[in-house]
Amino acid sequence: MSRIINVGVSDTKIDLFEGQYSVPNGMTYNSYLVTDDKTALIDTVDGNFKKEWLANVNAARGNKAIDYLIVQHMEPDHSACIKLFAETFPSTVIVANSKTIQMMKQYFRGFEFNTKEVKDGEELCLGETTLKFFFTPMVHWPEVMMTYETATKSLFSADAFGKFGTSDCDEPWLDEARRYYIGIVGKYGAQVQAALKKLSALEIKNVYSLHGPALTGDLSEILNKYNVWSSYLPETDGVLIAYTSIYGNTLDAVLELAKRLKGKTDFKVVDVARTDWAETVADCFKYSKIVFATTTYNGTIFPCMNSLINAIVERNFQNRTVGFIENGSWAPMAAKVMKDKLSSQKNLTFIEQEVKIVSSLSEENLSQIDVLAQSLLSK
């Protein structure tokens, strides 16, 4: 019977993953050794951990040779140690698809690897267990493939089903997995749907992602979340109010709206300028209704709101009800700018009643907020 050992590493010092995602609880770079009559290592780790990772590999393999290195994904946080591995274990065969082999040549120019190219659906026997390869392009790079191990019915899922945080940090899987998925994979919902369909015939008892903990037991809720996220469907029937406010007048309108929603629906108020941007992006895809509230600024909208809307548009924001609150002392146009930015997105319903503040709240604004609240509660 095969045995699966995680020989990966934890990075507890990193502050920004991919140079942009805040990771207060660090990050894992998983790498897995599958031992049977023959032994396969699945992926390597970030280049900052070469020595630690190689020590883990040697401790786990004991006296056994490593017959195969399976390369599922060429992003450098998983592929940086491939050359070191090939130099250390020159007889090991590197198993990869054609796109991966091409990328290896690009990353490690001039180095000759001992490779075996595999096709979609091809199998590799290790003894009692077999590895079967499934190409899952654009989840979230074009060369990505996943590996199914038949003995324990385990799916090695590359970056899919990963999360921010180290594997042993004390936090629920869901919130950081959502932030990870929407931020990094969210643009590629159609490709995730194709991957889920391809994998649906498999009996999966364990999921081993390249980031985060192993997922075992009843996986139905986790698979359902991925289906919802990749279908761009709301996860929660409720309202997200995302706002910016320079001197507090836009915030006054937001608080008035919150009063009218309290006790009647699930809602969340987020100060875009003071909240982790990736969390706010994830919340935009979590809730069924979004209200964007901001000021006209330099003829457009406040910079961090501009960044937020650009970020959700990049990730194919759709299937939501959207309302607007704008503020401007002489030429308010924030609502128009925001609507124009979102106009290319699919299946958005714009609430007709907009709240147009001129400097500070007026009685007319309070009536507009009443109508906006009623619309949010009725849809």
Image (cartoon, rainbow, N blue to C red):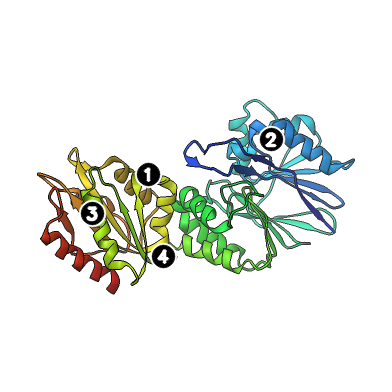
Check disc 1 and give the amino acid type: Arg
Q: Name the residue that disc number 4 marks.
A: 234
Q: Name the residue that disc number 2 marks.
A: 82
Measured in 3D between alpha carbons, the distance from the residue under mark 2 to the one under mark 4, in whole angstroms, is 40 Å
Q: Please tell me which of labels 2 and 4 falls first in the chain.
A: 2
Q: Name the residue that disc number 1 marks.
A: 274
Asked if one can make out residue 213 in the rendered structure from this viewpoint, the answer is yes
Provide the secondary structure element on which disc 1 rests: helix
Q: Name the residue that disc number 3 marks.
A: 252
Residue at the (26%, 46%) spot, across then down: 245
Provide the secondary structure element on which disc 3 rests: helix
- Rendered location of residue 283, percent (x, y): 41, 56
Q: Is disc 3 surrounded by few (<14), some (14 to 19) or many (20+) residues within 10 Å?
A: some
Residue at the (26%, 62%) spot, across then down: 257
Measured in 3D between alpha carbons, the distance from the residue under mark 3 to the one under mark 2, in whole angstroms, is 55 Å
Q: Please tell me which of labels 4 and 1 falls first in the chain.
A: 4
Q: Is residue 58 left or right of residue 278?
A: right
Q: Please tell me which of labels 4 and 3 falls first in the chain.
A: 4
Give the foreground label among 2 and 4: 4
Give the foreground label among 3 and 2: 3
Quarter of the picture containing the N terminus is bottom right
Kindly indicate whether the residue at mark 1 contacts the one at mark 3 (C-beta within 8 angstroms).
Answer: no
Q: Please tell me which of labels 3 and 1 falls first in the chain.
A: 3
